Amino acid sequence: MPACAPLRTHHPHPPHSPPPAPRRRFLVEGADLSASVAVFLIALPLSLGIALATGAPLQAGLVAAAVGGLVAGRLGGSPLQVSGPAAGLTVVTADLIHRYGWQATCGITVLAGLAQLGLGCLRVARGALAVSPAVVHGMLAGIGVTIAVAQLHIVLGGSPDSSVLANLRALPAQLADLHPAAVSMSALTLTLLLAWPRIPGRAGRLLRRVPAALVAVAGATATAALTGLALPRVDLPSWSSHALAGLPEGPLPGIAAAVLTTTLVCSVQSLLGAVAVDKLVAGRPGTQARVGRSDLDRELLGQGAANVVSGALGGLPVAGVAVRSSANVRSGAVSRNSTMLHGVFVVVAALLMVPLLEQIPLASLAALVMAVGIQMVSLHHIRTVTRHREVLVYAATTLGVVFLGVLEGVALGVAVAVALALHRLAHTRITHEEKEGVHHVHVRGQLTFLAVPRLSRALHLVPQGTHAVVELDGSFMDHAAYESLQDWRSAHTARGGSAELAGRRSGVTTADPTPSTVCRCRPWTPWRNHQACFAGTPSAPAAPAARELARGISSFQRNTAPLVRAELARLAREGQRPAQLFLTCADSRLVTSMITSSGPGDLFVVRNVGNLVPPPGEEHGDDSVAAAIEYAVDVLGVRSITVCGHSGCGAMQALLAAEPGEPQTPLRRWLRHGLPSLALMAGDRRARPRLAGRAPADAVEQLCLTNVVQQLEHLRAHDSVARALAAGALELHGMYFHVGEAQSYLLGRTGKVFEDVKDDGSAAEELRSPV
């Protein structure tokens, strides 16, 4: 060994971290095995049903399911997404088979897969997410309507036509010529499909572990076999006669449009499905850190490879499937092994279960696919697009897909979405009114150069020497509008008037190219260094502290004081009535008003090094924290006390690094109140607090979490706190803020797990005082 080589014998793994677990190879966990069985039981009947709906050979559905599980499951970037023949591709595939035949459709699938591989190499997967959700939901709804109308004919005992209009026109005649056997099996399938998930009681919880789709098809199959009904059943020809891919023939523009349509639908559905799977995993405690987020470019490459293989082997186009993916996540899958195992099970079923599969009535499969089509018209999606005022985009896309085709409908939806966005950008409503001597100019919409003439007319209605409030209810203001507004404000102020900017969107984005010597930082706008607001360049030397202080005060007086003056005046008259005592660290990165979205009068804040609460009655103790606690509880009557620690706490690092015999400086004497936290962390490992979904990153983070729990115990020892807790007038909360992730965690009711707070205000479990 070279003399300069470092010795590594004393530290085989980082200090304060557990030794790395030995790698387990070729071992499938029980959770993945059970999840793969659940997904297989859903995929088997659905794959046959989708193949039936497209008019393809029924084996093609099994081929696509197997390839989606094995190829996309192994190569894709979303470990828990399950791929296979998707209902969203039914209309596209059926149209291709009608135009070019089955083997040419397989060739188009191969070309679409190659196109997906090219897009994945170009790393444009994120671009697919730029498509308006209203367009995507409308596309799925239109496909769902087309599927439902077509399969209704098979449910009634007939055969569907190639277009929605033709199927609708033929429906009265089909209703007059019902086939009782087919209708009865379809009705039984739909009844089981709807009733199975609603079985009540403990027995229902056990039975619901079996997928409803499997129960519905198996029940109809068993009934048809026992009663001897004569009706069409699944026909799986010998695999020796299975057709493989062929070259498509026809006009090149038509083939190119077919490839583009297949690529678009497969890619968008798979990428949006991967994002949806990430959300499902994030909502499942304990696995988010283990599974990881989806790599969308890799997912696109995996889907492309799966389509190349599926098309070459005579299978349907492959995409991520929402029903199977959600079942995979909810069944507890933890790796891509579950997806791949489900593909293995499909292969085994296709080779060994052919006689059993051939007993399934086609009417039962049609009823199953019809139900899937109806579910694609989601009321939740309709409510969402209505709330965001995008019903027109949704309706245009849905009707375009139903009556024109998938690619045409999507193009129509995108065109309507763009037109609607341009209309909103150009349409700005500006009003002026006077209330109690104050002139209000209200701007609704985006403030661009197109609205400058109307803005100027409204501003000139404000008399000289009066107080004016300009309310900006939008999210963008360009340079022309900014200059017009600032020129009027300067002139109005020079003539003895006053003006202030207000509105629901206090941080309006502006295209203003004002010099960097003027601070343009808005409250909690992303920044690298607040001093950059005043320096000429990022590398400019820092200004003296007194000048920085004066500039900061000047910025407050100019920009913020006019917005908060009225509220502060009220608080000055009425006194403070905070609802919470917030005890946190003195760390400069911890901005309490920002992370709690609070304002003047909301929080009674105590800050010290290490967010420590000295126990009462200690000799040579520090009474400043105890005095603040007593004042907050007994005088101000706060209803809750929160102890907030944070990541990278210097006080906790100092505690861990302390050596016996060090000089007792003021800092060392203060940090002795954290020694009980060290002792608690050194105790039973199972009792240590942790973050939901992952273990602490290192010993410092573990001590930060433990310190919050220990300081809550110190709080309970204070007389004022104990009395308020006994009377039910006070709650205690523990909080941890991860600075690097800008993520807050609240201590749950067990007092051991810090749950992450979602952006909708919810947490993984009910958060109550950990008493």
Image (cartoon, helix red, strand yellow):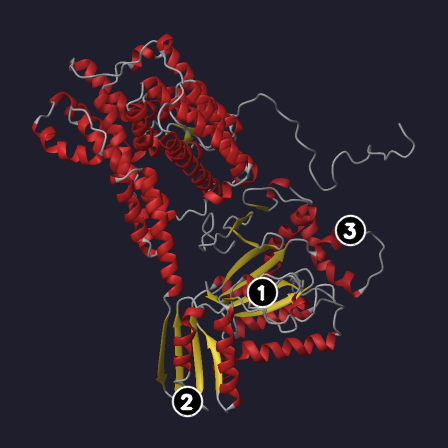
Question: Disc 3 marks which amino acid?
Answer: Ala
Q: Is residue 235 left or right of residue 344?
A: left
Question: Disc 2 marks which amino acid?
Answer: Pro
Q: Closer to the N terminus: mark 3 or mark 2?
A: 2
Q: Residues within 10 Å of mark 1 (few under 14, many from 20)?
A: some
Q: Is residue 81 left or right of residue 59?
A: right
Q: Is residue 385 visible?
A: yes
Q: Compute the Cα span from label 1 to label 2.
A: 41 Å
**Image coordinates for residue 685, horizontal then vertical, percent:** 64, 41
Q: Is residue 287 visible?
A: no
The one of 411 and 12 positioned closer to us in this rendering: 411
Residue at image location 53% in from the left, 28% down from the top: 75
**Image coordinates for residue 602, horizontal then vertical, percent:** 51, 70
Residue that numbered label 3 is attached to: 657
Residue that numbered label 1 is attached to: 592
Residue that numbered label 2 is attached to: 463
Q: Secondary structure at mark 2?
A: loop
- Tell which tag, 1 or 2, sits nearer the viewer: 2
The one of 693 and 231 positioned closer to us in this rendering: 231
Q: Secondary structure at mark 1?
A: helix
- Quarter of the view holding residue 41: top left
Q: Which labelled disc corresponds to residue 98? A: none
Q: Compute the Cα span from label 3 to label 1.
A: 28 Å
Q: Secondary structure at mark 3?
A: helix
Q: Is residue 230 left or right of residue 464?
A: left
The answer to whether residue 272 is above or below residue 420 is above
Question: Disc 1 marks which amino acid?
Answer: Thr
